[in-house]
Amino acid sequence: QRQNGRRTQLEILCKQLYETTDTTTRLQAEKALVEFTNSPDCLSKCQLLLESGSSSYSQLLAATCLSKLVSRTSNPLPLEQRIDIRNYVLNYLATRPKLAAFVTQALIQLYARITKLGWFDCQKEDYIFRNVIVDVTRFLQDSVEHCIIGVTILSQLTNEINQADSTHPLTKHRKIASSFRDSSLFDIFTLSCNLLKQASGKNLNLNDESQHGLLMQLLKLAHNCLNFDFIGTSTDESSDDLCTVQIPTSWRSAFLDSSTLQLFFDLYHSIPPSLSPLVLSCLVQIASVRRSLFNNAERAKFLSHLVDGVKRILENPQSLSDPNNYHEFCRLLARLKSNYQLGELVKVENYPEVIRLIANFTVTSLQHWEFAPNSVHYLLSLWQRLAASVPYVKATEPHMLETYTPEVTKAYITSRLESIHIILRDGLEDPLDDAGLVQQQLDQLSTIGRCEYEKTCALLVQLFDQSAQSYQELLQSTNSSTMDIAVQEGRLTWLVYIIGAVIGGRVSFASTDEQDAMDGELVCRVLQLMNLTDSRLAQAGNEKLELAMLSFFEQFRKIYIGDQVQKSSKLYRRLSEVLGLNDETMVLSVFIGKIITNLKYWGQCEPITSKTLHSVRKLVKLSAVQFMLNNHTSEHFSFLGVNNQANLSDMRCRTTFYTALGRLLMVDLGEDEDQFEQFMLPLTAAFEAIAQMFSTNTFNEQEAKRTLVGLVRDLRGIAFAFNAKTSFMMLFDWIYPSYMPILQRAIELWYHVPACTTPVLKLMAELVHNRSQRLQFDVSSPNGILLFRETSKMITTYGNRILTLGELPKDQVYALKLKGISICFSMLKAVLSGNYVNFGVFRLYGDDALDNALQTFIKLLLSIPHSDLLDYPKLSQSYYSLLEVLTQDHMNFIASLEPHVVMYILSSISEGLTALDTMVCTGCCSSLDHIVTYLFKQLSRSTKKRAAPMAQESDRFLHIMQQHPEMIQQMLSTVLNIIIFEDCRNQWSMSRPLLGLILLNEKYFADLRNSIVNSQPPEKQQAMHLCFENLMEGIERNLLTKNRDRFTQNLSVFRREVNDSMKNSTYGVNSNDMMS
């Protein structure tokens, strides 16, 4: 009775979890069900739910709970229990073929998970989880529903084994995947092809839902087999450009036999569009089989069949009106060139006909620009690759690209221009808004357009002149509609982008004088257009057209400005004839003029401002630059203004602006203090204004915040640029001591407003950063110590105040608190490792600045949960790099901390050792090394006869560590685990703390070694024992550099030998579990 009641209660909770719309009820249900999954008798309850559960949701709960149980790494289920669950699931699915789809799915997922994780488990010399095909055969010999379940099991299993999961080491995943590939995958693929052949032989009734479902699962299965990561290269799912499928040599027979390829082409023509995209996806993979699978004759034959199939699809293109089919077919076309050479393609029997069909298909696709825009990339990539190979093709057969490439170029250009009117008229999404996509297409076009370049240029000149003339006439006319003007601006925007792209596609060795002269024609037109649009900026401007101009300038600079360009280039001859620009300096003056115009008129437009500020090089001598250095105020550059209503956080571009100005100023600054003072006048005025405001009790807070944020962003830009001692010291003397109190006051007032504190803290962190040894004070100067006092004061002020905020919601905790703390950690790290302060003097003279800063660091640290330290990348990098400096130079401080703080720091190191970020992991190794070395030294000292009495803190620290030996032991096991079983990317760093850990825990290390040796198969144990013997060969009981280096060398040999030994063994992963 009680069980029934408990079951009904669980079913109600499941319903609430999956069906209710009320958030509170759902959260309560979720909480109760989490408790259920963690309860000790969860396993038996799950079986009960599956046996007698009346609702699909309770069956789903049982299946997902079981998946969690079999996946857990700590305290895994025993082998017998997992075998029972697997057999139970198979029987359950066989006797209930009509379960709800999501329940079947969850149970199959459970079967796949058990099989994957138990792949190397043996029972009586038999790999108990590997007879997958036998498990499935009984399903395939039964009804259609059973068949679907059988095929889905294989499909899901292939998928599951192909995907790494974060809870198990990558090396374990690869071992399972490789073993599955070698033992089962080809049989599964052959089975899927045979079943597909049977299905296509019968007249399937695809209107029947179950037969349709079966065919779909078979295609998914074939696709999963072909999509398998055969050699462990594609960790990233999104990269479509890994165009080679590394089919194992043992699969050759399937691909040499043309019936496999034929099967998929036949299926494509015989099944409805809802299924054919899957067929095309399989064909994309088959077309990408690695070249080395065939010899030349075999490859030519295979390619010939492939091209025939493509030709047949192009001759009967009805199904391509389905966007999914169309997309996959475009991918298939792209693979023709990514995997085969133009020289091979032209030898195919029907090449002339096929290239004509592909060109027509591409032209039609480009003209219908609104249909499947994301597929265009593949078509352009095919033509880009074809055009790029023209100079290298050795075959005597004609490639005919000189005929068809210009058609593709023309279709792309004209279709973009014609789209403008429709987009504006119907309010559609404008492709120009997607900068990444436009850039990608232009990169492709830059190669395509350079093929038969005369035709491309003639077309661009003709279209540009038409649009520019219409545009001018519209501007001069009094009654022209804004719509017409917008259309011409849109057309000109595309043309400017495209002209930039084709100029950027120039290759110096293949370019002729005639082509350079043509480039000159195009450049003249863009510069004339720029003069026209700039003259109108006071009334109106077009943001997209401006961005296109900047893109054009970038391409032009890359190709025609620089030391490698011939000054006699035909391009400059044309520019001087038309516009009087004789050389690159004159063109640069035009560029700078444009930069200033943009900063002046487009100050409010972040994309234009930030792109404009990117291009300030080789420019110092120009008069325009001198103008900027003398007039960087808001009347000339509106984005430096304060009165505008922009957001506080929108002033980021100011830092970039002042970094650029600072670099320009430094070129000729030398030791000229007057020039520096002159340059700083606007900033001096701003500081004085804020000081004035702070001195009165009532001031306009908004205005003060704006002025301050703008000012500190400007200063940070300058401080970043000044990386030489003379210039930085001028800046330091300018800001300290006069203006430091203002920054401190701002932190006191607005500590809870991140938009104000972040820029101030970042400025301080920049000022104390000894970049390129720029902070070098004279022997008689106390400035290093005074600068540290200011830093300590700011960290203490900010830290103590930010801790008064109390509990913050999870989604705001980073912005309001952790970001500021992270900058404080970076600031403290910079000042502690800057090498311009002797920290011993603080205690000597009773100055508490160092103590205050370190105590604030501890308070801040304890207010952050461990998980947050690793969840926020910037915080973890700043914390772990600070910890490295503290353990290196301030170990006495760490040793004096309370036991709970020491344990907190040690467990943060322990967790960081397994972090994905290599920088964090390396920092932890280094910190751990410093701590272990300190401990080892103190222990050695305490055992010496006439040792000086130990400092009180060292004694306490030793005592804490002796009370908690498990902490250091756990780290020893983690480091060893990573070195033996994982893909260890920073082996040298890992080796440094390991020796100290071993010497501090010799007995534990011996136990660990024995358990690893015993976990190996009997025939491997001797070899593993020997590896450990050699590891400690010639190692003495000290941490001197010579001894450490020897250990590091031994360790690389050890790792290599252990890996070789385990490669040849199907070791159980128990050793791993023992260590976790």
Image (cartoon, grey):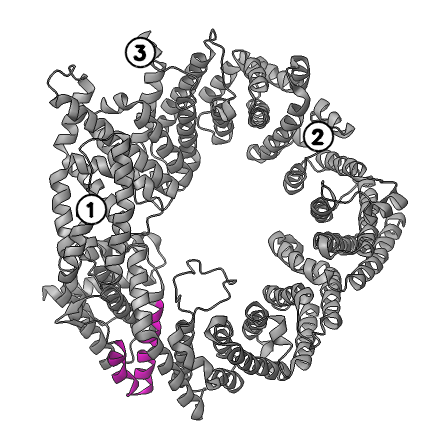
Q: Which residue appears at 60% of the width and 75% of the height?
A: 344
Mark 3 sits on what residue? 843
Mark 2 sits on what residue? 637
Q: Alpha-carbon distance for marks 1 and 3?
A: 47 Å
- For disc 2, the neighbor class at 10 Å (few under 14, some 14 to 19, many from 20) is many
- Mark 3 or 2, closer to the camera: 3
Give the x, y percent position of residue 1015.
15, 56
Question: What is the span of residues highlighted in magenta in the rendered image?
Answer: 132-159
Give the x, y percent position of residue 927.
30, 32
Numbered circle sitting on residue 1030: 1
Residue 875 belongs to magenta span: no
* Amino acid type for the residue under numbered disc 1: Asn
Give the x, y percent position of residue 173.
31, 60
Q: Looking at the image, is 887 positioned above or below residue 395?
A: above
Q: Looking at the image, is 675 positioned above or below residue 1046?
A: above
Secondary structure found at label 1 = helix
Residue 143 belongs to magenta span: yes
- Mark 2 or 1, closer to the camera: 1
Dominant SS type (magenta): helix
* Amino acid type for the residue under numbered disc 3: Arg
Q: Is residue 506 visible?
A: no
Q: Is 628 or 120 nearer to us in this picture?
A: 120
* Amino acid type for the residue under numbered disc 2: Phe
Secondary structure found at label 3 = helix
